[in-house]
Amino acid sequence: MKKIIHLIIVLLLISACTSTPETEAIVNIPVLPEVEEDSLVLFPPLETRIPNTDFKPAFVGQTRASSTQTQIAYSYSIINQDLVEPWGIDVLPDGKLVITEKQGQLVVLEADGSLITRITGFPTINTQNQGGLLDVSISPEFEMDSTLYFTYASLTTQGSATTIGRAELDLQSNRLDNFETIFVALPYLSGNNHLGGRIIFDDKQNIYLTTGDRQDFDRRMQAQDINNGNGKIHYLSKDVNIVDGFTSTVFSLGHRNVQGIDIHPITKEVWANEMGPQGGDELNWIQKDKNYGWPIVSYGEEYNGNPIGENIASKDGMEEPRYYWDPVIAPSGMIFYDGAMFEEWQNNLFIAGLRAEAIVRVILDGDMVLAEEHILTSEKQRFRDVAQGIDGSLYAITDAGRLYQIKTNE
Ligand SMILES: [Ca+2]
């Protein structure tokens, strides 16, 4: 049942007072009014810096949406700070945590963050630059098959590629058994950037895998080539067959570097973020066979300030991002929250922000962004991925090796 959201616009009253210069400056701090539970309080947009580009949004609310604040009291703690370049986190059915470390280790932790084991022995991985052991997702039938699915930058004589492997987690002897490679987003290429690498399952037990354009200027058009594995979101069965009714594993194209993807708990729509160029980070509603435009259209610019391509942000046949950030947040892993602990966070998106140094909460209304909140900003951490604990707490990992847990104060 759809919840009615009461919108209360809180106006920030700017002081008109121009007298008493000799006294302390008057700071008007907005006082949160008493609101009913489930109400959403809206403030002016968080972003006030000058954008990098002159592009105008294609529709109202496509960028710089209202900000909001979580109403319920919550607290957070660092429950482990000994991780080494963690990249992906998932939660086992019993609440234990599995976390990948880029150099090729899998860390298994208790739900409270205490170390159970650190497992090595992955196949040859290219750990240069943005490569390494990337994401981890538990099998949808983990309780029966004990299987974990991994993404990584494989290392071959022909170069590297975004690759899926799987293995059985044996927590009796703290090892991975029967590792096998199941999918490679070809072609192999030299260099090791813009690999995408997020993996999720849908409730049909099929896999979405994200890739990237592999960064080099003259490789970008790969993202527009339906026969090339890079710059895509792939959809495949967990036994690596092309899903019935599809002609290839390519689900959507025209992506620069997709670092976060999840499925809406109610609508079952696929949403993904995209690491854009300077000023062009995107949140996209992903639909089959749609073209998301890179490198033909972008709301960003080159890092040196030059235009991208023909300097256009929109084009017929190419999907508008449902939201974009300029300046960027550098979005990474993301989840839709549907846990038991935070009633007011139901179906909100939580995006790990690297450049933002925040966890970015996004409240959707249909295919529009209604509001945005940045949490844990005082921690000054590059957040890499987020996960939902079985108790509904929110976990987050950071490049500095920290694991946070966020809980309500009840
Ligand atoms: Ca796009």
Image (cartoon, helix red, strand yellow):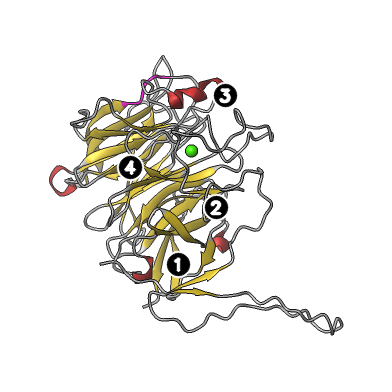
Q: In the rendered image, which quarter is residue 10 located in?
A: bottom right
Q: In the rendered image, which quarter is residue 187 located in?
A: top left
Residue carrying label 2:
63
- Identify the mark nearer the N-term, 4 or 1: 1
Q: Position of residue 169 (x, y in %)?
A: 22, 42
Q: Which residues are magenta?
A: 184-188
Q: Which of these two is toward me, 229 or 176?
A: 229
- Above/below status of 345 relative to 351: below
Q: CA distance from mark 3 to mark 4?
A: 29 Å
Residue carrying label 3:
217
Residue carrying label 1:
76
Q: CA distance from mark 4 to mark 1?
A: 24 Å
Q: Is residue 98 visible?
A: no
Q: Which of these two is toward me, 135 or 336?
A: 336
Q: Amino acid at mark 4?
A: Val
Q: Position of residue 84 (x, y in %)?
A: 46, 45
Q: Residue at x 44, y 55 (%)?
A: 368
- Identify the mark nearer the N-term, 1 or 2: 2
- Identify the mark nearer the N-term, 3 or 2: 2
Residue carrying label 4:
136
- Tally of marks: 4
Q: Residue furthest front?
A: 316
Q: CA distance from mark 3 to mark 2?
A: 27 Å
Of the two numbered discs 3 and 4 in the rendering, the one whose residue sits closer to the viewer: 3
- Residue 2 painted magenta: no
